[in-house]
Amino acid sequence: ANLFLDIKRNSMPNILLIESTSTICSVAIADENSILSIRETTDNSHSAVLTQYILDTLDDAGLKPHDLNAVAVSKGPGSYTGLRIGVSAAKGLCYALEIPLIAVDTLKSLAFKAKDVYPNHVICPMIDARRMEVYTALFDVNANYLLNTEAKVVDEVFLNDMKKILDDNKVVFLGSGAEKSMSVIKHDNAVFDNKLNVSAALLAPLSCKMYEEKIFEDLAYFEPFYLKEYIAKKSSVKALNV
């Protein structure tokens, strides 16, 4: 049984939002109507800044930790290390404050924003992975899934798959992986936006909806959506390769 199904909800819940799936480390606080405060950096320094950003956003919003009603974390797919850092912080706060954890699909949070910026477009958010690979999915004009999340290599095979959709629809490719697709996808119906990227602020609409519907995670068992298994690099120091 979920420990938080009978929580007493405030009319204006304060939700701490954590986005750590990429090189961007972003923390925000939202209520049902607006973003109260936000801090973010793009220099991949999650472990160094995340805790301070949490303290800063609380201070900016005039809140104390016990004023939070829930913590929402971007659950992936994305960077293995970034996801571990973000989810660990979110779980620790929820456990200490006895508040629920909300896990927001990273690609869906991008699609949910894109549907307002690019109405009447099929939405293809992309998170940069290694080399020419991206984590991606396909959403309709209302940000509902058309194709589930996959790791894709942006190549001629990907282009041929997308061409079937592009021939009949305007498609916006967005996020940190969109730039990779520009050199491969050449079509009049293709729009590219690598400026619209992941942010804690984008978690707000879905996390508030999930809070109202009491869609919470089990703190003991929740794991991020890695999509791919982590592969440790072989050390260049011989003594460590044992």
Image: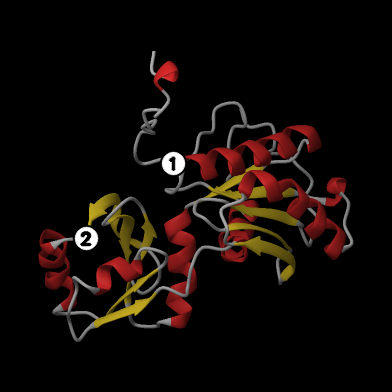
Q: Is residue 71 above or below residue 239?
A: below
Can the viewer see residue 124? no
Local secondary structure at mark 1: loop
Q: Residue at x 46, y 40 (%)?
A: 80
Q: Is residue 140 left or right of residue 3?
A: left
Quarter of the rendering containing residue 62: bottom right
Q: Is residue 40 left or right of residue 228?
A: right
Q: Residue at x 57, y 63 (%)?
A: 199
Q: Residue furthest front?
A: 238
The x and y percentages for residue 107 are 42, 58
Residue behind mark 1: 225
The residue type indicated by label 2 comes to: Val
Q: Is residue 101 left or right of residue 224?
A: right
The x and y percentages for residue 112 are 47, 68
Residue behind mark 2: 154
The residue type indicated by label 1 comes to: Phe
